[in-house]
Every structure is written in C-alpha cells, then in structure tokens.
Image (tube, rainbow, N blue to C red):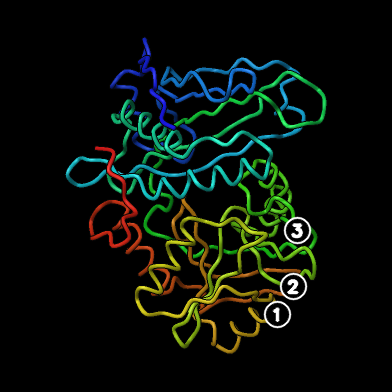
C-alpha cells in the first residue's frame, strides 16, 4: 500500500538565525524541527487515510481518548545522517518499520504498512533538511502511534494517529564515548515471558524509570535489569541492549524474547560475525559476570542503542558489591565496532548489507 502525502509547509517556520542558534548545542530531544508527518486510522472509514506533512502543532485529544487511559501507544527511534557530500542517509529504516508493525500487533493496534512508515520518515527529513546538524550530530526521528478513540471501555481502539516528529541532536558523548557505570536492579524487573518486553511501547519505559532513578541515587549512569523468573540473568539496560567480550575474542549477548530486538544489536552481531568472531545469544548471569570480570576472562562489556550507538561499561554496582571491567576503560572491540557502524551510517565506508537508504 502506498499513500500520497499532502505536503503543507509551515506558514511561519523558524528563522534561519534562530535555527542556527538552536543547532549550536541541541542536546538530546529538546529542540524540534518545524514539521511533522501525520496519518490517521479509522476502522469505520476503512483504515488509514489523510496522510499529511504539516506544521508541528499540538494534537487535539478528547479527555476520554483511549491512549490516556489504557496506554495503547508505541514508538520507534531512528536517525538521519549527513554525508560528507551533503546528502542524507537513513540507517535500516525498513527494520524500524517492521518492528513498528510487530509492536502494533502485540499491542492490538492497527498495523501501519511498512512503505507508509518509511515514506513518512523520508518526507519529514526532506522538508526539514535545513535542521540537519553537521559533524557527529544527526536528525533523530521519532515515529509513534497513539490510540485516539473517545471511549472508556477496555478494548482495542478503532481510531489511531500515527505521527513522525524530528529533533536535531548533537554527539551523544562530548569528547568520545566515556565508560558508563551501571546499577543492577534487584527489586524491579523490566519484562516477563509473554509480556511486552520485546515491544517498543511507552509502558516499558515508564516501568523502568523508578529503577533508573535508583541507579542515579547510587551514583550510576544507567540501570541493568535481571530476568523476572530467576532474578539471575542479565537482560538489558533501561533503554539499551548489552554485549560481553571474552578473552578468546568471542562475544555474547542476552537472547531475544523478553528484551527489545535492537537494530543496533542486530547490526553489531552481523558486523562481528563478518569479522570472523563467534557471537553467542545466550543467558549470562550476574554471578558469572562478576566471576569473569575478576578472572580476566571478560575483557569488555558495552551497551548499544540508536542514541549512543555503543557505550562501554566500566563499572557495575549492586547491593552484593561492585566490580570493574578491565580497569574501567573503553575497550578496543567496543570502540572498533562503534567506528565501523558510525562510518557506515555516515557513508564513509562501504555498506555490504545494504543498510543505508539515501534520502537524497
């Protein structure tokens, strides 16, 4: 299914002077571009209709809108990268579109055709291309969908709003990736088997905030969750997947099921295997992690996701004691994979898996 977007440019866009000022240090997710994509869904009208690119503005939602009461909501996160020749790349938007459909399916929401998702993202990048930061900055894109039916019964909504907004972001790390410290959450779990752990829905993130706050209280940057059944196995961070690197050159990462199938995670597995490394997707316990860090069998640990790409993990803190990984320094495997991935994203190297989609 393809939809033609009705393009209605903003009548009062940000002035060039104000835009340049905002792009000096945009931070993450605080500055927004002038436009958004919106597509509506109504079961009675036969599905998806009215695809528009319009000025970014508030939604009008009835106080009984389903999203406000039963949290039928999903989102994605991806970036547009400026190449040295001035063109713009998207990185694996088809994978985001597929995961968005999977999330919708699990949350009993209408499934947006993948080509409409990609078209909406591309149109926003095209109309707001002046907002693309240079250097290691990028344009962060946030496609999302909310249930908009006015109804207080507990059932899947029959109306939805899909939208894409964009936010210019600077480099996630000033002066290169510094190793992060993480707090092991032993009181809170992120997801159980059969739950929504593999889905990008707001509820998962809301449920992780208390644990993240606990991490910050303990002087840590991030939280890592254990499995909900045995409370032993490492699952993922508050918003990132995790990898372990061993002295024999192999890597391991927690298996899919209750964790988010990260696109960065999948890309790292592919690149590591391309380089001839063994990558295992298997459970890894906190106890084993501690033991391997002490013996030196574990050489590196790192987290990965769209925003930061790869963050080395230097220190792990928990109720049962703290430990460091390789003296708390960033390791060569994490940094090598990060460079390789970023070079593909910005079009500085070849793209053997056709992950890049050129917008222009």
* Residue 322 position within the rendered picture, expressed as x and y whole percent measured from the top left: 67, 74
| Residue 193: quadrant of the picture | bottom right
Using the image, determine if residue 122 lies above or below residue 152: below
Badge 1 crowding class, 10 Å Cα cut-off, few under 14, some 14 to 19, many 20 or more, is few
Image marks 2 and 1: residues in contact by CB distance under 8 Å: yes
Badge 2 crowding class, 10 Å Cα cut-off, few under 14, some 14 to 19, many 20 or more, is some
The mark nearer the N terminus, 2 or 3, is 3
Task: Say which quadrant the C terminus sits in.
Answer: top left
Q: Secondary structure at mark 3?
A: loop
Using the image, determine if residue 145 lies above or below residue 94: above
Badge 3 crowding class, 10 Å Cα cut-off, few under 14, some 14 to 19, many 20 or more, is some
The mark nearer the N terminus, 3 or 1, is 3
- Identify the residue at image location x=51%, y=20%: 49
* Residue 232: mark: 2
Which residue, given by chain and number where applicable, does mark 3 sit on?
A: 192
| Residue 290: quadrant of the picture | bottom right
* Residue 243 position within the rendered picture, expressed as x and y whole percent measured from the top left: 53, 70
Q: How many marks?
A: 3
Distance from label 3 to label 1 (Cα)? 20 Å
Q: Secondary structure at mark 2?
A: loop
Q: Residue furthest right?
A: 153
Image marks 2 and 3: residues in contact by CB distance under 8 Å: no
The residue nearer to you, when weighing 320 against 39, is 39
| Residue 177: quadrant of the picture | bottom left
Which residue, given by chain and number where applicable, does mark 1 sit on?
A: 287
């Amino acid at each position: 299914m393809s939809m033609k977007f009705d393009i209605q440019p903003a009548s009062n866009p940000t002035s060039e002077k104000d835009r340049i000022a905002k792009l000096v240090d945009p931070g993450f997710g605080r500055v927004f571009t002038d436009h958004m994509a919106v597509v509506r869904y109504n079961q009675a009208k036969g599905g998806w209709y009215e695809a528009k690119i319009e000025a970014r503005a508030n939604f009008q939602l009835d106080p009984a809108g389903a999203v406000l009461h039963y949290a039928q909501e999903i989102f994605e996160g991806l970036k547009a990268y400026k190449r040295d020749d001035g063109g713009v790349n998207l990185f694996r938007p088809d994978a985001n579109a597929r995961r968005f459909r999977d999330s919708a399916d699990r949350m009993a929401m209408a499934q947006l055709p993948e080509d409409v998702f990609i078209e909406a993202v591309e149109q926003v990048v095209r109309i707001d291309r002046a907002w693309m930061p240079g250097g290691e900055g990028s344009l962060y894109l946030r496609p999302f969908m909310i249930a908009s039916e006015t109804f207080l019964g507990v059932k899947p909504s029959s109306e939805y709003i899909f939208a894409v907004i964009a936010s210019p972001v600077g480099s996630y790390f000033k002066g290169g990736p510094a190793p992060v410290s993480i707090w092991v959450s032993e009181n809170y779990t992120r997801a159980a088997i059969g739950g929504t752990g593999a889905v990008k829905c707001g509820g998962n993130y809301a449920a992780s905030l208390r644990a993240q706050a606990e991490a910050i209280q303990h002087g840590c940057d991030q939280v890592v969750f254990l499995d909900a059944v045995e409370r032993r196995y490492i699952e993922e961070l508050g918003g990132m997947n995790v990898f372990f690197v061993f002295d024999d050159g192999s890597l391991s990462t927690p298996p899919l099921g209750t964790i988010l199938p990260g696109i960065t995670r999948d890309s790292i597995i592919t690149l590591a295997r391309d380089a001839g490394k063994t990558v295992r997707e298997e459970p890894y316990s906190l106890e084993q992690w501690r033991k391997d860090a002490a013996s030196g069998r574990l050489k590196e640990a790192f987290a990965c996701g769209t925003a930061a790409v790869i963050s080395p993990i230097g220190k792990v803190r928990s109720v049962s004691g703290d430990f460091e990984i390789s003296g708390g320094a960033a390791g060569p495997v994490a940094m090598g994979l990060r460079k390789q991935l970023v070079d593909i994203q910005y079009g500085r190297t070849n793209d053997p898996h056709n992950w890049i989609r050129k917008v222009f």
